[in-house]
Image: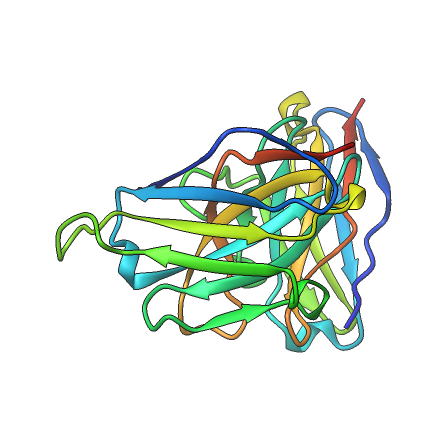
Amino acid sequence: YEVTQPLSVSVAQGQTANITCEGDNIGFKNVHWYQQKPGQAPVLVIYKDKNRPSGIPERFSGSNSGNTATLTINRAQAGDEADYYCQVWGGGVVFGGGTKVTVL
Amino acid sequence: QGQLVQSGAEIKKPGASVKVSCKASGYNFKNYGISWVRQGPGQGLEWMGWINVYDGSINYVQTFQDRVTMTADTSTGTAYMGSGTAYMELRTLRSDDTAVYYCARFEVGATNPHFDFWGQGTQVIVSS
C-alpha cells in the first residue's frame, strides 16, 4: 500500500494550510499525522484521522474520506514550519513521503 | 507522561553491527510496544519493525528481516510502573544504513497503532 503527499505546501501566516495524504480508499483506514522540525524527533499531532493528543493546539485538525486524508493547520504560525508525515497500515506501517510546510 | 531516552551516536565500518538502546521511564513499560523507525539523510521516515513488550511478539519489515533483532528488557522497575529498555541491533551494516534511528512507543492491540512519543534519535554513521 502506498500513500502520496505533496512535497511542499506554502501558507501565509495566519491563513490555513491543508496537507493531503492520498491512497486507495484511505478513508477506510485510520490515519495518523506527525510533525517533525529540523533536528528533532517526530511529534504526533493527529491520531485516528481527527483526534488531537493533549498539548496539540486546536488549530490542528484532521479529516479522512474517499481517497484523501487531510491535515489542516488553521491560523498558521511561523512555529508550524516543519515536515509533516502521514501514517497508515498497509500490511505494515506505511509513512507518506512527507510534506514540507513553509509559513510565509 | 513518559519518556524514551536513546543511546548516543555511533560510527561503524561496513560489515559491522550496531546496537541501539531505548530506555523507557514514566509509564508501565510492559503494557506497551516499542517500534523502530529510521530516517536517512534528507529522507523520510522508514518503519523497521516493532516489539510488543506485553506479549513478546515481534514484527520485522521484510527488508530488514535477515539483519535486525529487536529485544526488550523488562527486568527493571516495579510491577505497576515498570521501566525497561528496548534494543535494536542491525548487522552487516552498509553505507546506506547511515541514518538516525528512532524508537517510539505504541499501544498494543490496535491494527494500526500510532506512535504517541518518540526517543530523541540515535545517529548511526557507516563509513570505512
Left or right, residue B108 beside residue B27: right
Q: Nearer the viewer, residue A92 or B84?
A: B84
Locate residue B9: give its quadrant. top right
Q: Is the residue B95 above or below the residue A22 in the image?
A: above
Looking at the rendering, in which quadrant would you find the C terminus of chain A? top right
Q: Is residue B24 left or right of residue A9?
A: left
Q: Position of residue A94 (x, y in %)?
A: 69, 63
Q: Residue at x 51, y 62 (%)?
A: B50
Q: Quadrant of the N terminus of chain A?
A: bottom right
- Residue B92 visible in the shown view: yes
Give x and y (percent) for residue B41.
77, 35
Q: Nearer the viewer, residue B49 or B91?
A: B91
Q: How is the image coloured?
A: rainbow
Q: Quadrant of residue B28?
A: bottom left
Q: Residue at x 85, y 48 (%)?
A: A6
Q: Is residue B27 left or right of residue A46?
A: left
Residue sitting at the far right = A7
Depth check: A19 or B128 in front? B128
Between A73 and A100, the one nearer to me in the picture: A100
